[in-house]
Image: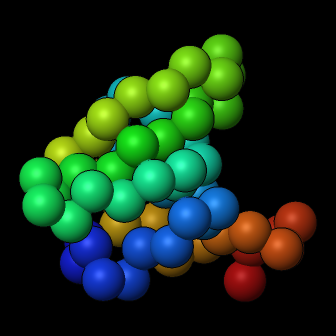
Amino acid sequence: MDINHLTTGMWVESHHGVGKVIGIDHQHHAVIIERRQDHQLQSINIEDLIEQPQLHSGCDRYY
């Protein structure tokens, strides 16, 4: 996933689960997410994110 396509507030998926991006660390090529299941903060390398185009804010259904 390209770090330049990420924005705060968007949902992302990794092998750690689904979380909301709350910060983007361009220097370390990582994002800080709030995990959906327990609201814990976690830093995840961009390489660990799974491209999931149907996982996004503002829509409650798949297309």
User: Between 45 and 55, which is closer to the camera in this rendering?
Assistant: 45
Point 38% across, 83% down: residue: 5
Residue 13 seen: no
Reply above or below: 14 against 55.
above
Residue 16, position in %: x, y? 38, 28
Which quadrant is the C terminus positioned in? bottom right
Q: How many marks?
A: 0
Image quadrant where residue 40 sits: top right
Residue 15 in view here: yes
Locate residue 61, reporting x and y percent: 83, 70
Colouring of the image? rainbow
Nearer to me, 39 or 49: 39
Above or below, 26 against 25 in this view is below
Q: Is residue 63 above or below residue 38?
A: below
49 vs 53: above or below? above
Q: Residue at x 32, y 35 (%)?
A: 43
Picture coordinates of residue 25, whole percent (x, y): 27, 57
